[in-house]
Amino acid sequence: MKIDNFFTNYSDEQSCKLFFKQKREAAGIVCRQCSSLCHCWIEKENRWRCKNCKQPMGLKCGTVMENSNLSYRVWLWALYFMSLTKKGFSALEMQRLVSHKRYEPIWLLMQKIRISMGHRDAKYILDGFIEMDEGFFEGHRKRSEEGFISQPVKELDRQVKAIVAVSTRPVSIDDQKTYRPNTRAGYLKMNVVSSLNKTEVTYEAGNMIKKSATVVTDGRRCYRGLQDICKVHKEIIVQNKEEVSKVFPWVHTAISNAKKKLSGLHHHIKDIYMQNYLSEFCYKFNRRYFGENLFDRLLVATLSSAWYEP
Ligand SMILES: [Zn+2]
């Protein structure tokens, strides 16, 4: 949707509410009690009622907006802004854009949208040829009153670890270019892990890849369990650091781009929220060719299930 059309059509609360209502009715409303698809809208109560079991269904119920007191306008505008650019906005910028007086609800709104993005991407499992590596991301460090970083307590000093996997496909010989990888990146996944031990990495990788996949790693010990969960596991041990980007071109590009985005845009990301930011990065990367359609896709992802439901 073009930016001028959007703000002309959805400038007030009523038009935004109507937009959500129409979108949800077009997708079909499913009763949470009896799974019936037949509902009637009760204007006075501002909700639907199941024709079968009379269970009410609020307009925000079963969507990313569930249990939120924010207006429909704030939600719709935030969803639009989050799909508008590749890099995204910080919570403070978003607060200004949607003209809301408080920071905290807007920060929470953005986290819920990021969680919904992560749930959407979790439905897709990587297959084919996959590059896999581990990424280390800077979490927030506590500072003392003087502004210095506090003593490096073991817990505070660690980085957030994530398993990163990118599916790739070969480029035909005619399309190959000098200084460019001879593969194209497909789908990206980044899953945070608490430690890089074999059991956890194998479990997390199992959620990311299909059994028919061929996975290439750098031969680290934690990847030893991959041979049990994929068709082929290739270990390529690269001695020269400059060669790494040739052997794993996409996974390293993805990790460094994610780091640049996080450090440039967001500050003080706590460890427990890192997955949400990585989910947003992956969601946008995986839909990088969608252009204006990204807004519609984000609406489908956020309106089809509650933010806490996978
Ligand atoms: Zn029902």
Image (tube, rainbow, N blue to C red):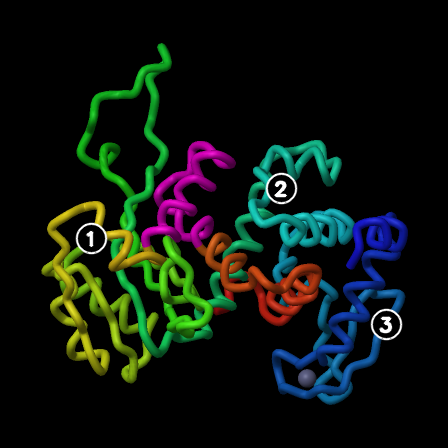
* Tag nearer the camera, 3 or 2: 2
Relative to the observer, which residue lies in front, 141 or 50? 141
Q: Nearer the viewer, residue 223 or 235?
A: 235
Q: Which mark is residue 106?
A: 2
Image quadrant containing the N terminus? bottom right
Front label number (1 vs 3): 1
Which residue bears the numbered disc 1? Answer: 195
Mark 3 residue CB less than 8 A from any atom of ligand 1: no
SS for callout 3: strand
Q: Place residue 144 in its image quadrant.
A: top left
Quadrant for ligand 1 reads bottom right
Q: Residue 126, position in %: x, y?
A: 38, 74
Magenta-span inclusion, residue 264:
yes
| Earlier residue among tags 1 and 3 | 3
Q: Nearer the viewer, mark 1 or mark 2?
A: 1
Q: Secondary structure at mark 1?
A: loop
- Amino acid carrying mark 3 in the image: Ile
Magenta span covers which residues? Answer: 252-278
Q: Are dots 3 and 2 in contact, CB under 8 Å?
A: no
Label 1 vs 2, first from the N-terminus: 2
Name the magenta segment's main secondary structure.
Answer: helix
Q: CA distance from mark 1 to mark 3?
A: 51 Å
